[in-house]
Each structure stands twice: as structure tokens, then as C-alpha cells.
Image (cartoon, helix red, strand yellow):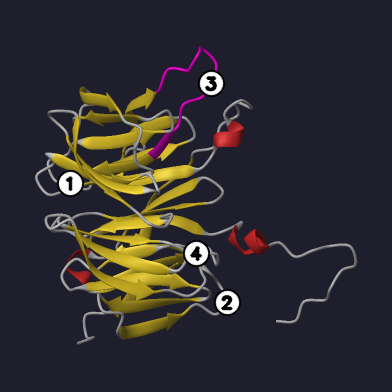
Amino acid sequence: MTVAAVQNERPKAHDAYKHGINRITVSTDGVRYATSDIKMNVSVYENDVEILHLNASTLNQKIKPTERVRGLAFSPEGHMIYLAAGDTLSAIRVDTNHVEWAYVAPRSFGFLIISPISLDVSDKGDIVAAFDNGSVMVWDAQGKVKALWHDNDSPRSVNFVPGGERVVGTDSFSLCTWDVSKKKRKLKIGLTGRVYGMSVHRDGTRVATRTLQDVVIWDLDQKDILGVVPINQGGPVIAMHPEKDWVACGEADHVKLVDFEGNLIMEIPLNGNPCLSLSFMPGGSELLIGSTEERVLRVPVAQVV
């Protein structure tokens, strides 16, 4: 496509990212997946048929500047969708669109809005969310608070490890794990470059972090690096394959799947539409890609050897 230059107007690099699917999450059984977009729309699909649609925007002008979907996750059985958007964390039944419970953090100093910035659900059904005031909270499925702590390294990306006893996350400058019951940080690894994306392997011991230049694969047990994969320009989106030592990375107008040594497994062109979100189906048979084209691309990867 050719774009005519307009006098006194400079192209903005972020213009390409003003629309599109910014989050994708898949249910444990792979039957349902959910998406959110830049316009605060949230949809749940079952066998590619939309069964739930809502818009998480608010009319409150004080909250409007914070509007963004920052977390999206299914309950283990897939009946609930948990949504972190604006200043609210909501638990929504998929079949009825009913909000079972919601949490809004108290205002700091009585007026400063505190927003959830990351969210995940454990295999036991607990929910963890980190907030932009440095607090981390854990709830059970009924919305009862199980743990609350504050940390200077409070994560902008957070994930439970299997069993739900620990969470791992990054504040962009360090990689940490926390013991949920003790509300205590157990591990901290200082990072040499700022991290813009993170993905945790299903085994809970390996983590991929992404800077603007590379993807680093970490072994949390050994507190060491397993591999470094150079990455070209593009949105800092990554997803680890649930079965193989592979990681999917967004680059410019395509997605590439590489192993931990950087060897190319496959490359998926996006026809000029930058990648905004990635998620593997359980078992890794398909890769779901959300792009600025405002649709989800489902790419089979099971036949790749």
C-alpha cells in the first residue's frame, strides 16, 4: 500500500496499534477462547461461535484515562471469565453474562485511582492480580481474599505455577517468585535489559522474557539462562509452547516460532497487520494470533516436527 505524504504531518509509529485484539486466553479444555480489543470489547467463543459479548468501558470520566483490558483468564472449568479492566477486577459467568463478584481497590489518598495491571488463575481456581500501587492480591473462586501483600517488585505480568502455591512475575526490571501462603518473595533475578513481555511454561520452572532486542529463556530452579534468541522489531508479544521447547514471537508483520536455541520452526505472515496477542491451544496443536486486523488467526502447528 502506498501512503501519500501530508505536509506538516509526521507518521506516528503507534498508529498501527490503535485497533485490534490485544488479549487472547484459552480454557483448559480448549473448547472456549476469549478475546479483548483496544476498544474494550470482550468476547467469548465456543467452537468459534461467539457466546458472550460485552464492553468494559465506563462513563466515569475519572476512570476513562485508565481504560484498558490488562488481564483476561478463564476459571479451570471454563464457566467463568475473569476480567481486569479500568479500575475493576470482575468475575463473570459466561453463560449468563452475570457478574458474580467484583473488586475495586480503595482510592489512594482518597482520590487516586488504583488499577489492576496483571491477572492469572490457578489450576485450583484461585485468582491473582497485581495493582499499580505495588499490591498483590489472591482470591478464591467465590471472591474471598486469601492473601494480600505489597512489594517494590510488584509484577506487571503475573502467572501462577502449577499447584497454585507460587506466582511468578516481572516488573520489567526483575524476575521474581512469591510464596502465596507466606506472602513472601522467594526469588529475585535482576534483568540486564527492560522486559516488555513474559510467558511462563506450563511446568512452572521455565520463563521467557522479552526485551526489544531478544527473548531470554530462564530456568527458575537453576536461576540461570537456558537460551537467548535475537528478535527483530515488533510488538513485544511472546507465548511459550506448552509441550515443546518452542516460543512464539511477534515481529513486525509476522509471527515466528523458534526453539530455545533460536532455530526457526515456522514463520506466519500477517499481511502488514502487527501482532498484538498470542496464545497456544492446550497441547500446542494450534497458535492463536490476535492482530490489528481485529480478528483471531488460528494456525495449526501440530504437524511441525
Query: Going 35% across and 26% down the picture, which residue do you hit?
Result: 102
Q: Is residue 240 above or below residue 58?
A: below
Apparent side of residue 15 relative to residue 258 in the rendered image (left or right): right
> Is 233 contained in the magenta span?
no
Q: Mark 4 Cα within 10 Å, few/some/many (few <14, many 20+)?
A: some
Find disc 1 in the rendering and name its residue. 76
Cα–Cα gap, marks 2 and 1: 35 Å
> Is 106 contained in the magenta span?
yes
Query: Going 23% across and 86% down the picture, which residue do you hit?
Result: 304
Cα–Cα gap, marks 3 and 4: 30 Å
Q: Secondary structure at mark 4?
A: loop
Find disc 3 in the rendering and name its residue. 112
Counting residues from the start of the chain, the first of labels 3 and 4 encountered is 3
Counting residues from the start of the chain, the first of labels 2 and 1 encountered is 1
Q: Mark 2 Cα within 10 Å, few/some/many (few <14, many 20+)?
A: some
Q: Nearer the viewer, residue 218 or 4?
A: 218
Counting residues from the start of the chain, the first of labels 2 and 4 encountered is 4
Counting residues from the start of the chain, the first of labels 3 and 2 encountered is 3
Residue 74 visible from this viewpoint: no
Residue 23 falls in image quadrant = bottom left
Image depth: mark 2 or mark 1 in front? 2
- Whether the residues at callouts 3 and 4 have beta carbons within 8 Å, the answer is no
Amino acid bearing label 4:
Gly
Amino acid bearing label 1:
Pro
Find disc 2 in the rendering and name its residue. 272
Apparent side of residue 37 relative to residue 249 in the rendered image (left or right): right
Image depth: mark 1 or mark 4 in front? 4
Cα–Cα gap, marks 1 and 3: 34 Å
Amino acid bearing label 3:
Leu
Q: Which residues are magenta?
A: 105-117
Counting residues from the start of the chain, the first of labels 1 and 3 encountered is 1
